[in-house]
Amino acid sequence: MTRVLVTGASGFLGRQALPLLLAHGHEVHALARRRQTAGADGKIVWHEADLLDAGASAELVRAIRPEQLLHLAWGVEPGRFWTSTENVRWVEASLALMRAFVAADGRRAVFAGTCAEYEWTSSAGPADPNAEPREWRMRERATPIVPATLYGACKHATHLVAAKLAAQSGVQLGWGRVFYLYGPHEQQARLVPAIATSLLRAEPTDTSNGRQRRDFMHVADVAAAFVALLESEVDGPVNIATGEAVEVGEVVRMIATNAGGEELLRWGAIARSPSEPDTIVADVSRLRDEVGFVAQIGLADGLRETVEWWRRQLADVPPPGASPR
Amino acid sequence: MTRVLVTGASGFLGRQALPLLLAHGHEVHALARRRQTAGADGKIVWHEADLLDAGASAELVRAIRPEQLLHLAWGVEPGRFWTSTENVRWVEASLALMRAFVAADGRRAVFAGTCAEYEWTSSAGPADPNAEPREWRMRERATPIVPATLYGACKHATHLVAAKLAAQSGVQLGWGRVFYLYGPHEQQARLVPAIATSLLRAEPTDTSNGRQRRDFMHVADVAAAFVALLESEVDGPVNIATGEAVEVGEVVRMIATNAGGEELLRWGAIARSPSEPDTIVADVSRLRDEVGFVAQIGLADGLRETVEWWRRQLADVPPPGASPR
């Protein structure tokens, strides 16, 4: 039994990790601004605190003295998070948390990183047409780390500092780079929920041309991969992904198959940013061979379950534009 | 007249920058934990605050609303600073300061970086003897950024985040990478003061074999280079150095020439770490051609003046081991 502190424990990803950690017999301390109320979580020790208040989180870590830390919290407001100044505050908060964890004799930490740490232009092919084409799968220690966004830069800077601090302190640090995830409880403004809820409401639904290819993983698989990474002794960056590149248009069509209303889709109504690469897909050999994890949930099954989850939610939530209850 | 906020204003480097900024007609706000009491600084507006208290520094920036920020403060306790956890706190403090500066509509910031951001092994030659020898002068956008130490990693992480935040906010950020500096008011445990004071006391003086080559610049030149960088519009990293590699043994001999006691030197008594590269020297073309700055103080003159400064100090300070007054 290991004493594990999980941050972002009420979030999209964190809430999936908690039951797995409990099932594996760990003493689970869950940190969130507001605790998740649903679910059979009687054995989870909840702590309510704002990680952006470095003093409060340091005090909590001193009191809990976790042996392991699974740091999933980060501000990811849809649309805004690529450039939000909040990212800088999350660097500060994450480093203060890591300092407190090291000072409290923590043994192993796993942080959530992102595919946005990698150079994205590399997947669009080399600028020099005579250059050798680069491997376009993003690989942990081969693809250049050149984040295009403040979000990616902030995650990478956190890794750089946390990894050096860990190494010189005898603490292990695993760094799970998340690609594209979907599933129940996702923020409604993001791709899958936005398409699913719009089609379920039988509304005209704008989408891009859908030709870009992305590596999608169900959030339950992402959480299981993080738990496997935490329970391993693997150090450094590990891509958390399936290794399969799927066209976003294919994802949208699969949502429509389950939600109905394919004829409501307005393909191309949303312009793609020229800075968005055509393909973002992971090399998953570290996850498979070193961590020993392979995704279990296929995209068709995962999207069917997700659309049904949203169908149930829509019975309970007011339509857009209605005033909050 | 520009309203400039200088951090680390009482420090080794900051105290040299203040009179230059005043002489150039700026409104100078000096931030330090404790203000520098000596010197004719009647026109300087002093602010006493601890930058490691992010709330206090943000409040100060909101009140001052500086147009320019010269951020020189960082914890650099001799011997300890390469690996001290304090470095992580300085990342947090520096990023909080940068956020506050951007939020207060600041226009241009210049931060102190370090040659320890660069890959140091590159100057020792390639590991593969058949590989092409690399350029061993450290160049801003060519030498790989692979910091070997927590200090270097923390400076680099700060740059990465501050530069992205600046770019998306329409703020200019110059990043002065400091190499080796010396001069009056240096911390006494560092190379030049340690050798100078020991020889001035006519004590046996341990030194390394002195064969490593370093790029030494007088602190008054370093300060003038930072002021020139601040007054320029140059964005991104700029090496602050002379471009001249001098053997450390040569520096030690020049100190002995002024302090006397060359026969007291015990060459080789201090072992060099195998991780220390043979040569650390800057390419200074950006500083010379883009900022328009060239060092004014030769090493022989600078060291003579520094030894004389220490000679005057030793008349006033108790010998080592004496209890503080």
Image: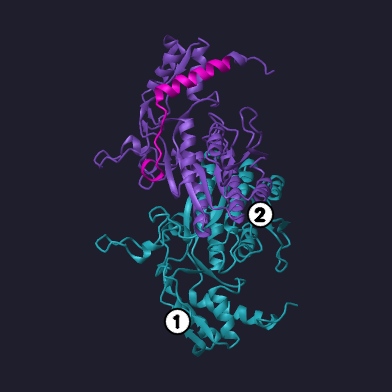
Chain colours: A cyan, B purple
Looking at the rendered structure, whether the residues under marks 1 and 2 are on a common chain is answered as: yes
Highlighted range, magenta: B288-314
Judge whether residue A286 can be spotted in this image.
yes
Residue B292 in the magenta stretch? The answer is yes
Question: In the rendered structure, which amino acid carries the disc numbered 2?
Answer: Leu
Give the numbered dot on residue A52. Answer: 2
Circle 2 chain:
A
Q: In the picture provided, is A50 more to the left or to the right than A201?
A: right
**Residue shown at the point (70%, 65%) measured from the top left:** A36
Residue A93 position in % (x across, y down) = 62, 51
Under circle 2, the secondary element is: loop
Quadrant where the C terminus of chain A sits is: bottom right
Please tell me which residue lies in front, B13 or B126.
Answer: B13
Badge 2 density bin: few <14, some 14–19, many ≥20, Cα 10 Å: many
The residue wearing badge 1 is: A268
Under circle 1, the secondary element is: loop
